[in-house]
Amino acid sequence: MPEPITPAAATLLAATAAVPSLTAFGIQLGLRPDVLVAGFAGALVAIVLLGSVPPGGDTWQHLVRTTMRRIAVSVASSLTAGYLTPLVLLISQPPDSLLLGASFAVGGGAQKVLLWAIARFSNPQPTSTGGPVQ
């Protein structure tokens, strides 16, 4: 009677179920490609349906500027979804379908949150000196 499972077969089964992580220049980034793609799809939906990056004009310069802004916003949103979604959902160990759905939502909502954070931290509010208001 053959053994039901050998250690080599168990290793192969576990290796195929693992999701690979991205590597750049030999450094492990900790990003899962499926979560990045879901965040990117959420960013595209937000750009197209919510109009989060409106066009600036009709000239080719405005077209190039708007295209570059849309690329930057979609990359930033997908990276935000790629890093934040697994951290937020780390406590409950959700299934992959919930992880990808949450990544889609984070990718779509990250644009507004990132714009708010940039505006909040780049322009500090002027402090009052205590003098009379003119």
Image (tube, grey):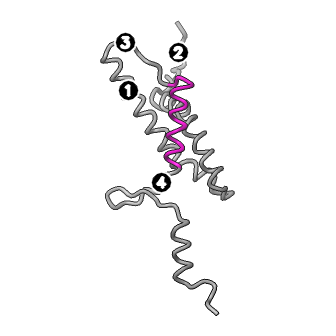
User: Which residue does the numbered mark 1 point to in the structure image?
Assistant: 67
Please rate how many residues cluster around mark 2, counting C-alpha atoms within 10 Å: few if below 14, some from 14 to 19, many from 20: few
Mark 4 vs mark 3, CA separation in Å: 37 Å
Residue drawn at (67%, 56%) of the image: 94
Above or below for 94 versus 79? below
Name the amino acid, label 4.
Leu
Q: Which mark is residue 31?
A: 4
Q: Nearer the viewer, mark 4 or mark 3?
A: 3
**Kind of residue sitting beneath label 3:** Asp
Circle 2: element type = loop
Q: Residue at x 50, y 45 (%)?
A: 37
Q: Main secondary structure of the magenta part?
A: helix
* In the displayed structure image, the side of residue 90 where residue 118 appears, left or right: left
Are dots 4 and 3 in contact, CB under 8 Å?
no
Q: Position of residue 130 (x, y in %)?
A: 54, 19
Numbered disc in front, either 1 or 2: 1
Dot 1 or dot 2: first in sequence order is 1
Write the start and end of the magenta stretch as one range: 35-52
Badge 1 vs badge 2, beta-carbon distance below 8 Å: no
Does residue 59 appear to the left or right of 104 in the view shown? Answer: left
